Image (spheres, grey):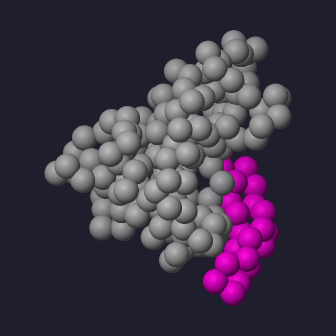
Amino acid sequence: MLFRDSNDGDLVAITEIYAHYVCHTTASFETEPPDAAEMAVRRARILGARLPWLVAEIDGAVAGYAYAAPYRTRAAYRFTLEDSIYLHPAHAGKGIGAFLLARLIERCERWGARQLVAVIGGNENAASIRLHEKLGFRRAGLLHAAGFKFGRWADSVLMQRALGLGDTTVPEEPAIS
């Protein structure tokens, strides 16, 4: 297994992996899967902010990916990032997510973030909740019935993890904010 920064050649696999979650789960509250061109725009925005977009590769194929994005756009949130992580369904439950998220945490700390937030679609998404708990996230809240998908209401579970010194000191400005 190889963990590395994503590249343009990964976009087809990334798009296919994400489409699975859009079409079959509440892990994403999107209802129509974006195409590869849209995913390229999203990835470029993340990389343009010098934030990480990582992939896990097995035998030359993308097995999963993870990235960090600004949590919100207002200036006071500039030290808080939101993680996203998606695994190819054939590779779920094999520990790949934990390795990806651990590397993402390291990269977010180096970037200068002090908090990492997970907004987990669907209270029933136990695997994602457990993964985040395993890596030091704690539940920070629940948005009851925040989304409507597949003909039913779905909650959003909010989880949070301090990075580096967290809120114990005044932060330095990230290299790119």
**Is 141 in the magenta?**
yes
Answer yes or no: is residue 166 visible.
Answer: no
Residue 106 in picture, x, y percent from top left: 47, 29
Quadrant in the rendering for residue 147: bottom right
Is residue 90 shown to the viewer in this render? yes
Q: Quadrant of the N terminus?
A: top left
- View extreme (bottom): residue: 151
Q: Position of residue 47 (x, y in %)?
A: 52, 33
Quarter of the image for residue 55 reads: top left
Q: Nearer the viewer, residue 33 or 150?
A: 33
Q: In the depicted view, which residue is nearer to us: 61 or 122?
A: 61
The answer to whether residue 142 is above or below residue 173 is: below
Q: Residue at x 62, y 72 (%)?
A: 31
Residue at 31% from the left image edge and 55% from the top image edge: 63
Is 16 a magenta residue?
Answer: no
Q: Main secondary structure of the magenta part?
A: strand
Q: Position of residue 157 (x, y in %)?
A: 68, 60
- Numbered-mark total: 0
**Residue bounds of the magenta highlight:** 138-161
In the image, 44: left or right of 97? right
Residue 156: horizontal and vertical position, in percent?
A: 70, 63
| Quadrant in which the C terminus is drawn | top right
Q: Is residue 147 above or below residue 174?
A: below
Q: Is residue 4 left or right of residue 37?
A: left
Please give left or right for residue 57 compared with residue 143 in the image: left
Outermost residue toward the front in this view? 37
**Left or right, 146 with reference to 41:** right
Residue placed furthest toward the left: 59
Q: Is 164 situated above or below 59?
A: above
Residue located 35% across and 48% down the image? 10
